Image (spheres, grey):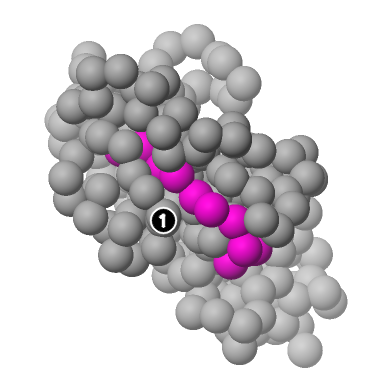
Amino acid sequence: MSTKISQSVQSQQIELSSRPDGVPTKDNFSLATVELSPIREGEILVRNQWMSVDPYMRGRMKAGDSYVPAFKLGEPLEGGCIGEVIESNNEHFEVGEQVLGNLGWREYWKSDGKGVQKLDPELAPIQAFLGALGMTGMTAWVGLKRIAKLRPGSTVFVSAASGAVGSMVCQIAKASGCMVIGSAGKDEKIKWLKENAGVNAVINYKTTENFSDELGKLAPNGSDG
């Protein structure tokens, strides 16, 4: 059942105050409090519970657009987020439902429901929809299953295997009955890949003098993905 509100809401948000030169610092951001007007017919009000900070966001802090628009100075940043519907004037959303949106870096947000996805908290911990069950997992799954046409028994080499998408590729390939060889550049990453992700072998690309020869020894019949 939808519920109407009759008052505005004070919401805190993180804004980009200047464009970073190198590694971003806290001086590049500012905390602001804004007032959200009451929701209108067809809108919902969401209180954020989880927000994702992803590598691509650094690129959006630079001036000039690439495949996505750059963040604007003096405005809140955007990013994947999960929140609870606390007020609804939209028949498709009920108070108490948890939803996935793209208006992170803020406490509250309003929407007409377009692009907002309802989530099933019984399927997995709700924050998993920002990772394994979200964009990260989908990227890995589509790359392996739809593009590479992964088959059981394949030998799969994964570059940057300890990264967000790379680690998902490793685990999906292993679960699909494949031999997985990864590459990483730090001992702790290599240890995690072997002990946690179950990768068959890992190459430290920073210490291997002849990378191609090492990979050839591990996968003499070539790699399928």
Q: Residue at x 78, y 45 (%)?
A: 149
Residue 7 placement, left or right of 49: right
Q: Which amino acid lies under the numbered mark 1 shown in the image of this protein?
A: Val
Residue 207 placement, left or right of 47: left
**Hey, which quadrant is residue 116 in on the image?**
bottom right
Query: Could you tell me which quadrant the C terminus lies in?
Result: top right
Query: Could you tell me which quadrant the N terminus lies in?
Result: bottom right
* Helix, strand or loop: magenta stretch: strand
* Magenta part of the chain: 175-184
Q: Position of residue 43 (x, y in %)?
A: 73, 63
- Magenta stretch holds residue 122: no
Q: Secondary structure at mark 1?
A: loop
Residue 109 appears in view: no
Q: Position of residue 48 (x, y in %)?
A: 46, 66
**Hey, which quadrant is residue 207 in on the image?**
top left
Residue 128 placement, left or right of 91: left
Depth order, front residue of 86/62: 62
